[in-house]
Image: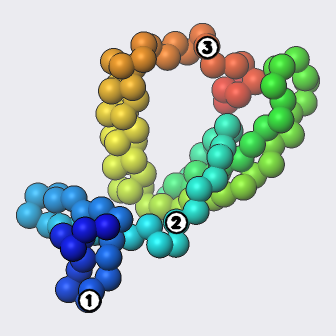
Amino acid sequence: MSAANEASTGRTYAASTMVGSTKVNWDDSKMRSTYANVCNVATTREEVMLLFGTSQNWTNTSTEINVELLERVIMNPFAAKRLLLLLAKTLEEYEKQHGNLSSAELSATHRPK
């Protein structure tokens, strides 16, 4: 990590980006990585909850699917809206590079009813 990524406290950050005139330092020292192939969303007036987990149902022939929930991310609606915009832009760039992801390719068992 470069000295350019050090804050005034002497701490080294994984990366820094500029958002307008504000420098954002990204600290990944406590970050964990988790794989998820299932995601769901629940909301209240004040919060949006993203639920991530894994399903071992690879054939999509079962009438019942068990999902092991692994992570819950809770955020306010403003952060959720920013996430929506970031994901939309990221997927748009992905599709330009790798081709369109069609809704028909999504398994019916993994879409909300």
Foreground tag (1 vs 3): 1
Q: Is residue 98 left or right of residue 31?
A: left
Q: Is residue 11 left or right of residue 44?
A: left
Q: Nearer the viewer, residue 45 or 109?
A: 109
Residues at circles 2 and 3 in contact by the CB criterion of under 8 Å? no
C-alpha separation, residue under disc 1 versus residue under disc 3: 49 Å
Q: Residue at x 24, y 63 (%)?
A: 16
How many residues crowd around disc 1 within 10 Å: few (fewer than 14), some, or many (20 or more)?
few
Q: Which mark is residue 105?
A: 3
Q: Position of residue 27 (x, y in %)?
A: 39, 70
Q: Position of residue 6 (x, y in %)?
A: 24, 77
Residues at circles 1 and 3 in contact by the CB criterion of under 8 Å? no
Residue labelled with disc 2: 31
C-alpha separation, residue under disc 2 versus residue under disc 3: 32 Å
* Quadrant of image for the N terminus: bottom left
On the question of residue 67 being in view, the answer is yes
> Which SS class for mark 1?
loop
Residue labelled with disc 1: 9
Q: Position of residue 51 (x, y in %)?
A: 64, 51
Foreground tag (2 vs 3): 2
C-alpha separation, residue under disc 2 versus residue under disc 1: 20 Å
Q: Residue at x 59, y 56 (%)?
A: 33
Q: Which is nearer the N-term, disc 2 or disc 3?
A: 2
